[in-house]
Image (tube, rainbow, N blue to C red):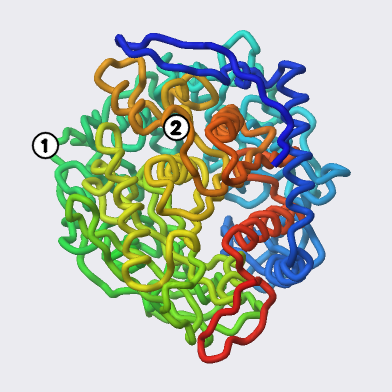
Amino acid sequence: MNYPPTRSEAVVDTLHGVEVADPYRWLEDERSPEVQAWMKAQDAFTREHLERLPGREALRRRFTELFYVESQSAPAVRGERYFYVRTHKDKEKAVLYWREGEAGEERVLLDPNTWSADGTVSLGVWSPSWDGRKLAFSRRPNAADEAILHVLDVDTGVWSELDVIEGAKYASPSWMPDSQSFYYAWLPSEPSIPVAERPGYTELRLHRLGTPPSEDAVVHPRTGDPRTFLNGGVSREGTYLFVYVTRGWSENDIWWKRVGETDFRLLVKGRGAKYSVDVWRDTFYVLTDEGAPRQRVFKVDPRKPERAAWTELVAEDAEASLQGVNIVGGHLALEYLRDATTRIRLVTLEGQPVRDVALPGVGAASNLYGLEDRDDAWFVFSSFVTPPQVYKTSVSTGRVDVWARVQLPIHPERYTVRQVFCDSKDGTRVPLFLVHREDLKRDGERPVLLYGYGGFNVSLLPSFRSSIYPWLDAGGVYVVANLRGGGEYGKDWHEAGRLHQKQNVFDDFHAAAEYLVREGYTRPSRLAISGGSNGGLLVGAAMTQRPELYGAVVCQVPLLDMVRYHLFGSGKTWIPEYGTADDPADFPVLHAYSPYHQVKQGTAYPALLMMAADHDDRVDPLHARKFVAALRKAGPEAPALLRIEANAGHGGADQVAKAIESNVDSYSFLASVLQVDLQPRPLDGGEFSGR
């Protein structure tokens, strides 16, 4: 490929006695005119190449059928008002609606499709007041994390001109019961504050409607530590205010006070454990993994909040990992994972078992949404072959009914979902979900797409993904690997994949790939891998550690320079997950798997499509730029393409048309490299015909 040129420089750092080359450091400065010109040239080259690939129109037509859908979310009920979002077949973005009562007339509240001519301004968080008459919500330019908070009057739809709060990147408004004020996390945006230091400047503030945000009271000051997150909220009854100081994804502290008191007091200090609190009728319900890797629930009397006085309400389950607790209808709704599939249990506020919620199948379900003192509750269920459906249930009777259904042009009976287990390098049993057509023939020739994440206590569930259906229809296999570093099996599973144990994640992924080859599904040249963000680090490490095992890679908004990641974006907040090269104990671990630093000259790497976003303010796109440059220098055998989504943040653009084009690009790339014909057609006895 005749790529646009990329220069290199003789930049070498000596870290802890080790020389570390960084020939593409100049690509870190996105504001540089040279870097801007380089990005424009690389993106244009990639798009021109992708546009020439066959099968794109058929993919575009199929994705259009699958992505433009009529759907509805579960409602948030405030007073007698119902708030929910809907997608439409003729709109690019979801629209926020409200009704007076469950059967009331549907009214548009916010339509982000009208906010900008090019569709680049997105709806972020939205939070109705407890009486349903006000709504706090954020707008996100370029679908980035940075946001501006607004307030509107629900009855009139009029936006307040005074209640406009900048610095709402981490804001999640928590309303007082009088619906006249809310607490929120505020983050200053002064250019003088280095980007990587900003999280340590977060404050908890109180905003009173109708007053200038500049007068908002600082309720809890900044921590000054950029490795921490600070947030907080008030109990529904407006009695108790909580502040969370979180270090990474493994531990946090909780401070609290009664509203009106001056000083916060420490409820619990997280020493290698994490905690969350729900409150109802002067009782704290604490979910924690302290002394229970799969989590348990305590009951706490705020008059005796000392740790020794806590009472265990729900003990740790030996076989299922407790993911979350909600108080609905005077009960505790407990969301569990067992081998990465959802179970929902109801218990009384005293911890006595009531029933399991009747889910419509084996798959992924949300916990129950509802109010503490109302019987009605909702949950969302999906599986690899079932689009998300919203169900309404009665907490008292257990009755479950469909509340909102999604119809898509697919035939679930044509596909099979299997869960299998493979053994990792150290013998750890790793679960995989395999999705494919019923008539699949295991002849070692199937095109396989393997997806993983493996970090930050994130659990990958067997939930619906519209984008995989052209792949399945063409005889491909889609695989999700539940790697260590995730939360599928609780704290121990997460701990086994973080810090100095990070290599376990990559070993799990390699083991999954080897299983798929050994069991006759595919061969390395027909095995593709994909991942984004921390999952982008995963596939970057996979392709540099075992280049012979993989045929193609789609890497999205990744971390890839693990020596300097903490100096950019939100990097310092991830130090508790990865460690830092500033630490002499962490450096050799990071350097050993850092994909950018492990690219070797003369190595035949699998074909790469790198997908970055120009307004990613979470993971700096410098990682994508530097890695592609290094990979091209290593050798010309396989393509290394860089695609840059314009006006998009870490989660990509939120317009359906852009999602379609992104998927057309990635799947046509995979089809070209793996020689897959993605034209939908029946197979003869399971046979697959490649080009």
The tag earlier along the polypeptide, 2 or 1, is 1
Residue at position x 81%, y 43% from top? 158
Q: What residue is disc 1 on? A: 308
Spot the residue most to the left. 308
Q: Callout 1 environment at 10 Å: few (<14), some (14 to 19), or many (20+)?
A: few
Closer to the camera, 236 or 586? Answer: 586
Locate residue 126 relative to residue 271 in the image: left or right: right
Q: Callout 2 environment at 10 Å: few (<14), some (14 to 19), or many (20+)?
A: some
Q: How many marks?
A: 2
Residue 252 drawn at (x, y percent): 31, 32
Of the two numbered discs 2 and 1 in the rendering, the one whose residue sits closer to the viewer: 2
Residue 603 drawn at (x, y percent): 46, 39
Q: What kind of element bears circle 2? A: loop
Locate residue 558 relative to residue 148 in the image: left or right: left
Q: Amino acid at mark 1?
A: Ala
Q: What residue is disc 2 on? A: 600
Please tell me in which quadrant of the rendered image residue 221 appears. top left
Q: Is residue 449 visible?
A: no
* Vertical placement of residue 200 versus 300, above or below: above
Residue 281 drawn at (x, y percent): 34, 49
* Vertical placement of residue 112 versus 357, above or below: above
Quadrant of the frame with the C terminus: bottom right
Q: CA distance from mark 2 to mark 1?
A: 55 Å
Quadrant of the frame with the N terminus: top right
Closer to the camera, 545 or 36? Answer: 545
Q: What kind of element bears circle 1? A: helix
Q: Is residue 132 visible?
A: yes
Residue 535 drawn at (x, y percent): 46, 45
Locate residue 537 relative to residue 670 in the image: left or right: left
Residue at position x 37%, y 66% from top? 516
* Vertical placement of residue 380 versus 191, above or below: below
